[in-house]
Amino acid sequence: MPLNRAFAGVTAVVLATALTTAAAATPKVNKGRVTAKSDYGNGTVTAPVRMARHGLQVRLPGGLWYYCEVSCIDTLRREALDFWETRSEEGGDNDFD
């Protein structure tokens, strides 16, 4: 098998895998809105989602549009509901003295 054909086959498989992964990572958006539930009992919040220049964004309760990282639901949960708990998990000590 010529090298060009083998390379084209591998490229096609890698591209198909990447597209499938990207489609799976896209959150299910209900009419342009997502609802996140706190992992720590801090309630729930529903917010709009939009497509921006570099990907999906979710609007935080204060009005700031924030790029979705893992998913828009996860980003909304971490930034709006579980902000301090998330920071504690990521950085440990939150003593600012």
Image (cartoon, rainbow, N blue to C red):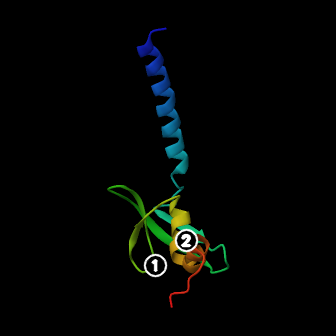
Looking at the image, residue 1 sits to the left or right of residue 90; the answer is left
- Is tag 2's residue or tag 1's residue first in the polypeptide sequence? 1
Q: Nearer the viewer, residue 15 or 63?
A: 15
Q: What secondary structure is marked by label 2?
A: helix
Q: Residue at x 56, y 80 (%)?
A: 84
Rendered position, 12 above or below 31? above
Task: Judge the density around disc 2: few (<14), some (14-19), many (≥20) Cα neighbours within 10 Å.
Answer: some
Whether label 2 touches label 1, CB < 8 Å:
no
State the separation of the CA atoms marked 2 and 1.
12 Å
Please provide percent x and percent y for residue 21.
Answer: 53, 43
Disc 1 marks which amino acid? Pro
For residue 37, what is the image quadrant? bottom right
Using the image, tell me which numbered label, if any, was put on residue 61.
Answer: 1
Q: Quadrant of residue 59?
A: bottom left
Identified at 53% across, 58% down, the residue is: 70
Amino acid tagged 2: Arg
> Does 92 appear above or below 26?
below
Furthest residue in direction front, as rendered: 97
Residue most extreme to the top? 1
Furthest toward the left, the residue is 53
Q: Which residue is mark 2?
A: 78
Q: In terms of depth relative to the viewer, which is nearer, 78 or 57?
A: 78
User: In the image, what residue occupies the spot 32% across and 56% down?
Assistant: 53
Report the disc number at residue 11: none
| Looking at the image, residue 31 lies above or below residue 17 | below
Q: Residue 72's spot in the image, x, y percent?
A: 50, 62
Residue positioned 45% across, 74% down in the render: 60
Front residue of this view, candidates 14 and 23: 14
Please, is residue 68 above or below residue 78 in the view? Answer: above
